[in-house]
Image (tube, coloured by chain):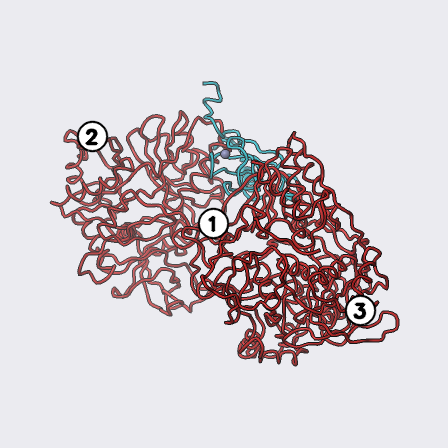
Chain colours: A cyan, B red
């Protein structure tokens, strides 16, 4: 299996670590911001534990630990193992300050 | 046609480096033909089979040399110990398996048909006792009924103890293949990568055509061939190509391929796996053709080949016909007979009978007759001689019988006669022969194209499966694609090669396809001749036709059930010659068609691969990488005993002369630290440089406690959770500047924490301005601990540095100048509980730092200490480590719940608040000391209420860490105990089922020594 890292090019899968579904987003909340603790806990429960197990194209997190140490978001077909697209996580690569134009 | 006279090598790697013994007299090769063949008669080679010395020539395989020496019997079969001979001339061989070499290099189940001959080769037959000719185990044949399909499941249903005592030893001795070496493998194996545009698998006519087309077009081509020579069936069957004799065409094609710099030919290299994304695996047998590898040479090499396109031209395998006695030595595939005669000038029989149901088998007639032997009969069930072979009948005065071979008579020396049954009237006649050549048709090699669950497609006209949906990027061509004539192979290979090259963007011209005749091919399927004796489907696993029909009667109709119930196709040859016959017989028995019956799933490896090859160089001390601390060699010189912690080697203790055991050394080291000063290399802790305007905010989110409020020049202990609320790791983090922190992790979690921090930075909080750099290997970090630590350090730093409590208080951090000019980082932190400093110098100064500490510390009796003393002191101080940070504990379980900030969100905060993680009856960290002060406490022992009966209902936790405490003069420990903090002073039961010990212990505070922490603030 080969994975095309946007920074390093196509590399062997042994350089990468799989994390899983990239769909869940970490809930954002303000401490003591008035939101009900139950709702916050439910949102975290979903985020931490609930995953879809698709037969087909999925967006997944992969980590290029054997290369540039970037977190990547890969679109992969879980049936054929085909990688359709690999993009960098929002904060991968250059520092956010540089992205901000500094 | 006759074979070739071969005077120059066909491929670059072809010459065999034979070590010809001077003066050795070639023994009589009774069945060696005088004519041609691709062997080098100037290079005679001596070899031994079952202790008997024989001679062959360079270019022989072990099988062809045995044929040339008239050897028919080469082994005994798996279950019934029936005499077996050589069936094929290729890697599909099911029968001629031998034990190659001796001692540490002994390898069982080597196919004699692929083993190249070398001078001094030693091979032995398998499965015979006491000798091949007089095998007492062949009595198994008489007990055949107990060895039928499913016998493992049926016969041994009696009391279980019978299995161990009687059946298993009996079966293991009676049935089984050869013995492997019992010594470590002395050879080296290698793994390598190769990349190309077009990978061509198999160098027969189709593969050569494909490689030529793609190579001319300009693609980077790799052509792999499992044989030592390229040419495939051209080496055995010849023919005429572009008006040239096949051998001349082959020479020209080879020359052209070799001249193309973009084409790489890899012989002795068998493709065995097809993986995702155009990755292929092949085994190169680098040194199997010599007695032992050259110095620094590997025995075998696994290639992982990345190819944008592949063309599988792996040919076809001739299929046996199932009839009574079809396994006798001397019954051989017709194509193999032609290979032995034409390629190796070795004659399998002098009076050959031919049994064929297809036109291709008829080629054998001319081969045998031109070799000066005689075809005694051609048996063809089709009642008509193929038009193109009509002339042979007259030329050689052939006896052609319309019928089938229904039995084979013979003994250990092989076939003596065959019984032919007339297809029309059922009358039988006996024909004397010493070799029966059989052709049941050709099975295209669909295996590689089916490794991704491709389903092969049945083609009625050739009565065989052809590739179905091949993996992405793979094309099949030639005989592997069901094209069985030479002309079609050349065309098909050329167009597949040209297409693959074009798909890779090659713009050159692929040239013209070479031309040859399209020989007519017709076949009338014949799977099984019903008869009385045993008719074998799977020679290697001794599966007979009646085993298959029995499986059908007992309901195992699915091919996957058939395979497992009868073990058909499960031997080392993976059923290359048997699977299709087995399922055809099943189809017939169950009244279904062959495509309805289907095939079993094809899986890699295509051919057996030694485990050593998969391991490559990753064995023994190279099994994984080894990391050495900066002071490693210094510690080794000072006699350290090392311990593996992950990839690291760490000094465990430093024994001194006269010390009787590790405990004495460790106790001395602890007392030296507590009473004077010692130092320890702690460079293995993970180190991360954290920089950026938002570095503090970032750390606030990953740690449960606050770091943005940490003053510059200070260090703080931090604890991080997983998002599910369980503790992930701990360590001290220092603030070196407003936007610069230096974070440490535990040794074990350095990698996972780095990965987690990068996830937080890149995925969860990309808006933060922060950058992370792993600095574990950049710094040598040494802990200097003990009441004299400051005095020792003062001797090493510039005199202007103020290390007093006022100038450099507990938890202080700063850069210091060392005498001599090196700048170091100094941390006033303590793991031992003593006054302690950790000093960081660039890694290259680590050993010098240790040496200077030794010299400067002499007046204070400085003592280097290892991880054991470190562990003793942390348990005495109640500091948690790996055994307590075990992936099930919360911050509160560790007694660190108060560190959790209430003011901010952090990873794990919400889930840590869950009911189960905050339940009052959780097991929490406590101190434990045996009531009997002389008793040794053991980690892993269970904690139960005093006087309770041990069991799951009374279990309340366990002992996590133990040590002998020199300060308390007894064994102490930490443990995780239900409601432990409320139970200080309680006497509990300790139950150790592993060591069958039961004793009592007292629950106490985990901080055994200096609970007020006075000493570290010293
Ligand atoms: Zn990368």
Asked where in the image residue B590 lies, by quadrant, the reply is: bottom right
Q: CA distance from mark 3 to mark 2?
A: 96 Å
Residue under label 3: B404
**Chain where mark 1 sits:** B
Task: Tell me which numbered mark, 1 or 3, is placed earlier along the sequence.
Answer: 1
Taking the view exactly as shown, the residue that stands out farthest to the right is B425
Q: Position of residue B273 (x, y in %)?
A: 60, 50
In the rendered image, residues at marks 2 and 1 fall on the same chain: yes
- Name the element at disc 1: strand
In the rendered image, residues at marks 1 and 3 fall on the same chain: yes
- B509 to the left or right of B362: left
Taking the view exactly as shown, the residue that stands out farthest to the top is A101
- B34 to the left or right of B717: right
Which sits in the foreground, B718 or B815? B815
Residue B582 can be seen in this image:
no
Residue under label 1: B190
Asked where in the image residue B933 lies, by quadrant, the reply is: bottom left
- B971 to the left or right of B759: left
Residue under label 2: B821
**Chain where mark 3 sits:** B
Q: Position of residue B136 (x, y in %)?
A: 58, 80
**Chain where mark 2 sits:** B
Residue B855 can be seen in this image:
yes
Which sits in the foreground, A46 or B815? B815
- B156 to the left or right of B102: right
Q: Quadrant of the C terminus of chain B?
A: top left
Q: Position of residue B954 (x, y in %)?
A: 44, 64
Does the residue at mark 1 contact the one at mark 3 (Cβ under 8 Å)?
no
């Amino acid at each position: 299996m080969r994975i095309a890292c946007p920074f390093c090019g196509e590399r062997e899968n042994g350089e990468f670590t799989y994390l899983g579904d990239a769909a869940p987003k970490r809930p954002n909340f303000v401490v003591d911001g008035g939101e009900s603790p139950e709702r916050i806990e439910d949102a975290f429960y979903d985020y931490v534990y609930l995953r879809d197990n698709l037969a087909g194209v999925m967006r997944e997190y992969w980590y290029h630990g054997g290369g540039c140490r970037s977190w990547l978001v890969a679109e992969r077909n879980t049936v054929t193992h085909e990688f359709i697209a690999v993009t960098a996580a929002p904060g991968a690569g250059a520092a956010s300050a540089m992205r901000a134009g500094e | 046609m006759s074979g070739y006279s071969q005077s120059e090598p066909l491929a670059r790697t072809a010459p065999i480096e034979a070590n010809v013994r001077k003066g050795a007299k070639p023994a009589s090769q009774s069945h060696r033909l005088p004519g041609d063949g691709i062997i080098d008669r100037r290079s005679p080679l001596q070899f031994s089979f079952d202790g008997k010395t024989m001679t062959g020539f360079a270019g022989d395989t072990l099988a062809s040399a045995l044929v040339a020496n008239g050897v028919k019997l080469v082994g005994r079969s798996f279950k019934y110990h029936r005499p077996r001979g050589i069936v094929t001339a290729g890697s599909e061989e099911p029968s001629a398996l031998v034990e190659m070499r001796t001692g540490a290099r002994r390898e069982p189940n080597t196919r004699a048909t692929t083993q190249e001959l070398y001078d001094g080769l030693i091979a032995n037959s398998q499965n015979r006792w006491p000798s091949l000719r007089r095998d007492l185990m062949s009595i198994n044949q008489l007990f055949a009924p107990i060895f039928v399909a499913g016998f493992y499941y049926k016969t041994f249903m009696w009391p279980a103890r019978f299995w161990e005592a009687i059946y298993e030893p009996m079966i293991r001795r009676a049935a089984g293949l050869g013995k492997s070496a019992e010594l470590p493998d002395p050879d080296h194996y290698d793994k390598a990568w190769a990349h190309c545009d077009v990978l061509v698998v198999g160098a027969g006519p189709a593969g050569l055509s494909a490689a030529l087309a793609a190579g001319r077009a300009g693609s980077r081509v790799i052509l792999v061939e499992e044989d030592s020579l390229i040419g495939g069936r051209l080496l055995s069957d010849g023919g005429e190509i572009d008006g040239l004799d096949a051998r001349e065409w082959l020479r020209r094609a080879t020359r052209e391929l070799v001249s193309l710099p973009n084409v790489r030919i890899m012989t002795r290299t068998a493709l065995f796996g097809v993986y995702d994304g155009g990755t292929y695996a092949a085994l190169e047998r680098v040194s199997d053709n010599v007695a032992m590898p050259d110095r620094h040479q590997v025995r075998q090499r696994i290639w992982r080949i990345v190819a944008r396109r592949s063309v599988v031209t792996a040919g076809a395998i001739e299929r046996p016909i199932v009839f009574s006695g079809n396994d006798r030595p001397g019954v051989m595939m017709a194509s193999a007979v032609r290979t032995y005669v034409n390629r190796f000038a070795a004659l399998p029989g002098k009076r050959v009978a031919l049994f064929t149901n297809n036109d291709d088998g008829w080629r054998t007639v001319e081969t045998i007759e031109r070799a000066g032997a005689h075809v005694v009969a051609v048996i063809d069930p089709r009642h008509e001689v193929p038009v193109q072979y009509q002339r042979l009948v007259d030329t050689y005065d052939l006896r052609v019988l319309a019928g089938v071979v229904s039995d084979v008579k013979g003994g250990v020396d092989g076939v003596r006669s065959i019984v032919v049954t007339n297809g029309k009237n059922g009358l039988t006649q006996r024909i004397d022969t010493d070799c029966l050549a059989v052709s049941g048709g050709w099975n295209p090699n669909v295996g590689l194209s089916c490794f991704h669950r491709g389903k092969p497609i049945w083609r009625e006209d050739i009565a065989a499966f052809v590739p179905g949906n091949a993996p992405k990027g793979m094309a099949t061509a030639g005989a592997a694609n069901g094209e069985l004539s030479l002309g079609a192979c050349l065309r098909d290979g050329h167009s597949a090669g040209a297409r693959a090259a074009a798909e890779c963007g090659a713009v050159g011209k692929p040239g013209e396809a070479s031309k040859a005749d399209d020989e007519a091919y017709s076949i009338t399927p014949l799977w099984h001749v019903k008869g009385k004796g045993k008719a074998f489907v799977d020679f290697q696993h001794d599966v007979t036709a009646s085993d298959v029909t029995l499986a059908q009667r007992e309901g195992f109709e699915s091919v996957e059930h058939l395979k497992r119930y009868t073990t058909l196709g499960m031997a080392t040859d993976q059923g290359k010659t048997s699977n299709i016959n087995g399922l055809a017989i099943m189809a017939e028995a169950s009244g279904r068609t062959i495509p309805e019956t289907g095939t079993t799933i094809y899986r890699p490896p295509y051919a057996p691969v030694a485990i050593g090859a998969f391991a490559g160089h990753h064995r023994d001390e190279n099994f994984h990488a080894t990391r050495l601390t900066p002071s490693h060699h210094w510690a080794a010189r000072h006699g350290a005993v090392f311990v593996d912690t992950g990839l690291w080697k760490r000094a465990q203790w430093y024994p001194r002369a006269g010390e009787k055991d590790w405990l004495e050394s460790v106790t001395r080291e602890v007392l030296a630290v507590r009473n004077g000063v010692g130092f320890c290399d702690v460079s293995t802790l993970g180190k991360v440089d954290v920089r950026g305007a938002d570095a503090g905010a970032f750390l606030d989110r990953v740690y449960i406690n606050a770091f943005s409020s940490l003053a510059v020049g200070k260090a703080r202990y931090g604890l991080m959770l997983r998002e599910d609320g369980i503790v992930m790791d701990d360590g001290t983090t220092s603030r070196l500047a407003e936007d610069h922190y230096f974070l440490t992790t535990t040794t074990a979690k350095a990698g996972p924490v780095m990965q987690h921090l990068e996830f937080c930075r890149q995925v969860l909080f990309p808006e933060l301005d922060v950058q992370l750099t792993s600095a574990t290997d950049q710094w040598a970090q040494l802990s200097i601990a003990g009441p004299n630590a400051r005095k020792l350090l003062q001797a090493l730093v510039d005199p202007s540095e103020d290390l007093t409590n006022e100038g450099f208080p507990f938890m202080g951090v700063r850069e210091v100048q060392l005498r001599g000019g090196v700048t170091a980082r100094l941390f006033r932190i303590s793991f031992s509980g003593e006054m302690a400093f950790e000093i960081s110098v660039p890694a290259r100064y680590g050993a010098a730092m240790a040496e200077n500490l030794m010299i400067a510390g002499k007046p204070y009796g400085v003592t280097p200490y290892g991880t054991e003393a470190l562990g003793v002191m942390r348990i005495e101080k109640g500091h948690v480590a790996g055994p307590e940070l075990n992936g099930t504990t919360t911050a509160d379980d560790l007694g660190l719940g108060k560190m959790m900030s209430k003011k901010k969100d952090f990873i794990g905060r919400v889930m840590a608040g869950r009911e189960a993680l905050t339940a009052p009856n959780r097991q929490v960290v406590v101190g434990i000391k045996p009531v009997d002060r002389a008793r040794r406490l053991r980690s892993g022992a269970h904690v139960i209420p005093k006087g309770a009966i041990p069991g799951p209902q009374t279990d309340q936790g366990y002992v996590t860490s133990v040590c002998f405490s020199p300060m308390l003069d007894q064994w102490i420990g930490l443990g995780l105990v239900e409601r432990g903090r409320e139970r200080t002073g309680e006497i509990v039961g300790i139950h150790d089922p592993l060591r069958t010990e039961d004793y009592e212990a007292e629950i106490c505070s985990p901080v055994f020594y200096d609970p007020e922490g006075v000493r570290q603030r010293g």
